[in-house]
Image (tube, helix red, strand yellow):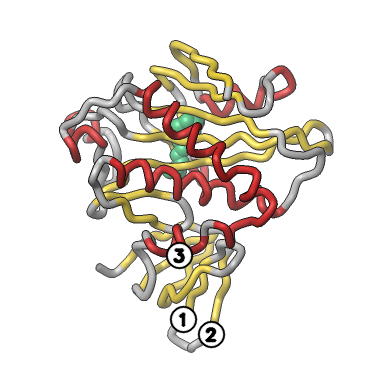
Amino acid sequence: MNFLYLEEIDSTNKYAKEHISELDDFTVIYTSKQTAGRGRFERKWTDTGKNNVYASIVLKPSKEIKEVYSNLTQYLCVILAEIFESYNITPQIKWPNDIRINGKKISGILAEAVFDKNEFQGIVLGFGVNLSSSKKDLEKIDQPSTSLFLETGMEIDKKVFLKMLTDKFCLRYNSFIEEGFLLIREDYLRRAEFLDKSVTIKVFDKEISGTAIDITENGALKLIDNNTTEHVLLIGDILWMKH
Ligand code: BTN
């Protein structure tokens, strides 16, 4: 991996997308201050301090886009979970790719495919990790959140964390691109917070409620609603989950 550090930027994803033609495969853009971070579904990602991770990996695996690329967020999510476990905390995955510790979000992932005219240029895999945020920093966020520092009392440098993450990311990357979500399905399911729970999923402007029963071999969420109709959702967000 090549690392490109920017002292301050509006969004590392936006920067990576705009500069993708000049950036090599496996370049990590990261910053200490992100002024207009973006999350999934047009939400924002708030900057909660300079030693947090705001980063985007540029990936150029092929000339054509493939379905498996949409599962890269889940691949990264499992890697993040493994790293959190190495600090003796218990991460839980909230489908599709949020990580929470005791119901509080610690990291989020936003992948974007980049096209120039109609030609596929690559994937920008962006992620934010609360490494060092204090309770006060997190008050700015409108959902329960935590940080690695608050959970462990440890101050991990963001470059050290990023190096660990990208080393792990590279280990199974080629196999993942070949084999797809099945390679990590068990690792993902083991940490799934939502299985067998009543959930409400938002898919764009629609909401579906039911019981989350499984994750398919493509990483989609299988849900049974009150009329026992099965739904298989490839995209969406858990709005509500019964505890
Ligand atoms: C989410 O939870 O909705 C995804 C959040 C992704 C945030 C990261 S921070 C670095 C990168 N740049 C952005 O603008 N967003 C992602």
Q: Distance between the residues labelled 1 and 2?
A: 6 Å
Q: Which residue lies under the disc numbered 2? A: 229
Q: Which amino acid does label 1 sit on?
A: Asp
For the C terminus, give its image quadrant. Answer: bottom left
Q: Where is residue 199 in the image (x, y as percent from the top left)?
A: 38, 69
User: Based on the displayed image, in which of its 4 quarters is residue 65 positioned?
Assistant: top right
Q: How far apart are marks 1 and 3 (CA)?
A: 11 Å
Q: How crowded is mark 3: few (under 14 residues within 10 Å), some or many (20 or more)?
A: many
14 or 140: which is nearer to us? Answer: 14
SS label for mark 3 = strand
SS label for mark 2 = loop
Q: Which residue lies under the disc numbered 1? A: 225
Q: Which mark is residue 201?
A: 3
The residue sitting at 45% across, 13% down in the picture is 8
Query: Relative to residue 60, is residue 188 drawn left or right?
Result: left
Name, please, the residue furthest toward the top: 7
Q: What residue type is labelled 3?
A: Ile
* Contact flag, marks 1 and 2 (Cβ < 8 Å): yes
Q: What residue type is labelled 2?
A: Thr
Q: Where is residue 1 in the image (x, y as percent from the top left)?
A: 57, 25
217 or 212: which is nearer to us? Answer: 217
